[in-house]
Amino acid sequence: MDLSLVTFAQILVAVLAIIGLMVANAVVMVYVERKAAGFIQRRPGPYEVGPWGTIQAICDSMKLLAKQIFVPANVDWVLFFLAPVLAFFPVLLLFLPIPFGPYLTGLAVPDGIVLILAFAGFGVLSNLFAGWASNNKYGLLGAARAVSQSVAYEIPLILALLAIIFQTGSLSLTEIVEAQGSYPWQWNILVQPLAFFIYLVSLVGETNRAPFDLPEAESELTAGFHTEYSGMGFALFFLSEYANMLLVSFVCATFFLGGYKGPFLDGIWWTFIKAYLIMFFIVWIRWTFPRVRFDQLLNINWKWLLPLGLINLWITAIIVKLLP
Amino acid sequence: MIRAIWDNLKGLYSLLVGMKITLIFLFSPQKTVHYPRKTVERENLITYRGPLELTRGKTDPAVTRCISCQMCVKACPGHCLTVVKNPEKSVKAPIEWKYDFTLCCLCGACVETCPTSALAFSHRIYLVARTREELIFDLLADLKARVEETPVLPGEEGASAEAAQG
């Protein structure tokens, strides 16, 4: 690929649009999540700030912007300030290869999913840096949990995606969408239901969301790896958490739910509808299930998801080889 | 192995049941009372244990059932009750009944120990005071004021008529 001026401009516009999408997504999802939590517990959720509490999330982000950044004693300064930045910036890159619409892709790289899976590892690294550098026992425990959990859940996640990649014969997200049809019975979810289920469980584990939110388990570790962060440091972790949720939802929509293809008219709206349905699913299970214990979390992964993923991949490989 | 798989499938089914419950709750009406704009109705407050009050008398509701036996004063761990006997020995009713709510821990020892059930918890949930002195209640005056405000309690018309006849 030649890095011409046009490509450079394209990347610049895409990154700016992605920053806008990330911030808008975080503001909207915080409001939606708190409202959903309220309705599930039969209370109104945010209600007083603005009509039906609509500007509550904006006021909260203003508060975070204006807050003092408090640095505790004996922190590792470089890693302490590197961690939130390292959590935030790789996510910008991760959105580039996603096909939002038939012609709307930030940067159509041929091996898009490899780029996403490779750079998603920076999130784990930033959690480890944050927990280690803040010189706090809760932070360190949270970081240790984050690393073992994310490393474990990446494997079934990749196995589930590999089954689709075997079937399509391509690593490009656009080609994977093109291989699926416009109607729900032509999507990969019906061909690979087990892979979809494994991916759905692993994405919750990979984004550290409840019921697998052990790295930031409030009742055990105060806030886990971001205990010592205030102000914008915390806000960057928060933004990147919601951006990661959105990313795995987009990847799920692309791989299993036909991406931008849908009944009546293909387009960007179908990608967003599908991704936000999965986001709502993540919020829904957060307010339904209690947090699992750490041994249960790893047992689910190593004893069930990993063998199931391997069997699924093996059967897929045989069928792809025998029935071309 | 087959047992473990079956157990896990049952577990997955129970997860779906839980998700169905939260989905139904998501669309059911809310239970919250928006306090400054709305208040809780009296029927939902009968389990609320607020500051003490003297119960209405059996024959005349404005006269307390208290016999100045001082059992509540001895039982109180916070020393918040003051009951002054009538100097005339023939009259059992107290002449002064002071209750310091700033010291009360709402333990209910006085209510349990009272031989004539003259004490009870009120349901005053929206109690506001700006000074300490406002929280030292004169319960005899409070009883008189309550009886003047509502001579017959709602839902007790028949019972009080029977008591008057008997």
Image: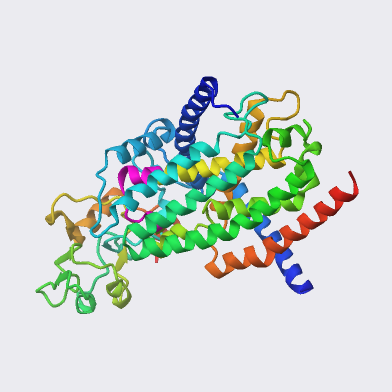
Above or below for A68 versus B116: above
Q: Quadrant of residue A174?
A: top right
Residue A140 in view, yes or no? yes
Highlighted magenta segment, given as a residue range = A225-236
* Residue at position x 63%, y 27% in the image: A269
Above or below for B162 versus A15: below
Residue B151 in view, yes or no? no
* Residue at position x 31%, y 71% in the image: B108
Residue A209 is situated, as x and y percent measured from the top left of the image, at 52, 53
> Is A233 within the magenta?
yes
Q: Quadrant of the C terminus of chain A?
A: top right
Q: Residue furthest front?
A: A2
Q: Residue furthest left?
A: B87
Q: Is residue A110 left or right of residue B153?
A: right
Identify the main secondary structure in magenta. Answer: helix
> Is A229 within the magenta?
yes
Residue A258 is situated, as x and y percent measured from the top left of the image, at 72, 36
Color theme of the render: rainbow
Above or below for A140 versus A95: below
